Amino acid sequence: MTVKRGLKWGGVLLLLGLMVAAVFLWDPLPDNPSSEILAANASKYDAEIIRDDFGVPHIFGKTDADVTFGVAYAHAEDDFLTIQESVAATRGLLARYKGGDGAPTDYIVALFDVWDTVNANYESEVSADVKAIADAYVAGLNLYASENPDKIMPGLAPFTSKDVIAGSLFKTPFFYGLDGTLLELFSDDRMAEIALDPGTGETAWMVSPRRAPPRGSNAFAVAPSRSTDGTTRLIINSHQPMEGPVAWWEAHMVSEEGLDIQGGLFPGSPMVLHGFNRDLGWANTVSNPDLSDVYKLVINPDNENQYRLDGKWEDFEVKTAKIRIKIFGPFAYTAERKVLRSKHGPVIQSAKGSFAIRYAGMGEMRQNEQRLKLNKAKNWEEFNAAMSMNALPSINYVYADREGTIAFIHNGQYPDRIEGWDWTKDMPGDRSDLIWDGYRPYENVPILLNPKSGFIFNSNNQPYDATDGPDNLKPADFPKSMGLQTDQTNRSLRIMELTDGTTKFDRETLLAMKFDTGYAKRSQADKVLSAVLEHDWSAEPEMAAAPKHLLEWDRQMDIKNRHAALGGLTVVHEITARFTKIPPPDPLDAFRQAVAYLNTHYGRIDPEWGEVNRLVRGDLSLPVSGASDTLRAIYPAEIRDDGKLHAIAGDTWIAMVEWDKDGKQSASVIHQFGNATLDKNSPHYADQAKLFVTEKWRTALFEREDIEAVATRRYRPGREN
């Protein structure tokens, strides 16, 4: 009887405990507004959307705002979930929807002071035309939400104009590798590099090289003087993830206020990020300059909320981040974490100490203003004037226009650092003279305009190799404190192997270079292969045939190549280690693993590369050429257990823009899948995939009559159609 009574009371106590926990963890998301409230502002705008035979939206409106209203609505039709998740991340609410995996993002939003910055400066720093565009964009999102209430993430609507500005403020610094710096700072095994006063004659207390973040893209511009037919050509070839918040979506925007541009947009973006209008175009490639600085702080042993600066103890600015982390359904717990800022910037505390970070793009809210000016530019002078706003923290620009002007801009907000210090190291945080204030003027940005060879390229390599002619930029012309990158990629090395500074390009030659699948001499792949081929394999009889097979490889990664699988699987770890952060195996072990993998899954070491390398979309699986860091860039998600590599990033939306010697424009474009990002039932979910893998194109449409001739749908959101 006593045991039963004890069990009974134990159950009661457990139930009471669960009830108390439920009360404390009960945190339901609020209801979204009614459809009527969400749609209230839609009547202010009038956009016509014409979907062509590939589902690409051509959006027409009287004003720029009308057009961006239509852009938001059309993009929501194709990828509403990703747009919403981007908004949730920017608001610092991702963990409330995604659980613990979203908590680091939410903390960084708080660390970067995104919303206090936006709320304090929106009225004064965001131009009137950008406010109008932001208002229109969220009106388009809210209209779509009003018509599809079952697709709204709980509690996320309504979308606001400040979401647009905050999104750019938060995300743009990550394109030059700030995320890698943050990951290092948060790591408890960090070994800090500390720069010493240059007067001491020493360089560092402890050396631990930073790892470069993953970045890719190709861009080519050919002047009329270098073309066999006098045509100006631009190839836009960004390497992005094939799905997710930075995957390309294509649109054409036309207003009576000067917009007539088509190109790629990310979810949540109101403007074309790179593309072309009737007069000019530009390609972006990610650069990796040193645009952030880490300062090692000295904390007051008697007060953890103070740090030393110029011999005095300074108070941190202290806030508390409350991160709501989903458990399940309406239950969530709130994690509180202290957020510190010093005069340097955000402060990160780890087991190795306290570090402040100062970075390009801190507090910058003018990105969309600069992008609007770029979208509407008509010539080099207007384009360069827009670039001189210097509101975009990084990103290379390769430019071409109707007049035959070509240019390379190694764009960046380059910190105005004092000379003499090694800014690649962590800086002592107790000296205020090392806290830089502002950026070098745009006139100091590396720009190569109309080089003598008539050819410009960039493949995420150093800015000192941007043309194959004699007039490249010189390292001596730029101070070390600018932090310009000094590395090459296989792709840049391969371009230099394929060009000679004089031989003219026809269209086919230029495209053959863009779709080249080779690994260059002096590349990472070449070093791995040399180590394997120089090794004596006689002690391993099971490997007898493999070295000879590898020796016969021409270093190409084309679909039919029967040596590429062995070679590609041997070098892939070394090439991708810089962004996976997974230490690569020794080259000999990598070779052994490749042999074992192919024998296990194919019973041979020489399957065609297309059997292994696949572009997969729904039920569609297609062979595709290319590999990691080739000009035909195809990056695998992983080395799968089924013997296949599924493409996850690399070549995505690509464009070839041309102006002939008479100034007549044409353009060819392709997307790796299709414009319907999430709708598996749409005919445009994978309708470009077969063209993409066979390296073919669709024609970009400029004229309204041509668009109407192939239209599959015409409608005006929020109005009777």
Image (cartoon, helix red, strand yellow):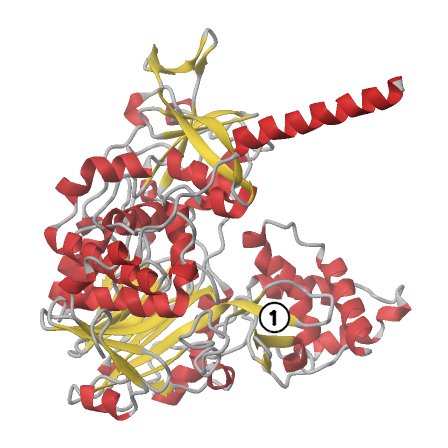
Residue at 28 percent of width and 44 percent of height: 414
Residue 584 image point, x, y percent: 66, 54
Residue drawn at x 33%, y 56% is: 395
Q: Quadrant of residue 429?
A: top left
Relative placement, left or right, of 114 versus 540 is left
Drawn side of residue 102 relative to residue 366, left or right: right
User: In the image, what residue type sits under mark 1?
Assistant: His
Does residue 72 lie above or below 392 as drawn? below
Q: Residue at x 78, y 64 (%)?
A: 592
Furthest residue in direction front, as rendered: 1
Q: Residues within 10 Å of mark 1 (few under 14, many from 20)?
A: many
In-front residue for pair 192/204:
192
Q: Mark 1 points at which residue?
A: 646
Is residue 398 visible in the rendered image? The answer is no
**Residue 106 in the image: x percent, y percent?**
44, 40
Q: In which quarter of the image is the N terminus?
A: top right
For the point 81% across and 73% down, the residue is 599
**Drawn side of residue 470 relative to residue 136, left or right:** right
Q: Nearer the viewer, residue 187 or 686?
A: 686
* Quarter the C terminus occupies: bottom left
Q: Can residue 537 be seen in this view?
A: yes
Asked which secondary structure carries label 1, the reply is strand
In the displayed structure, 108 sits above or below 427; it is below
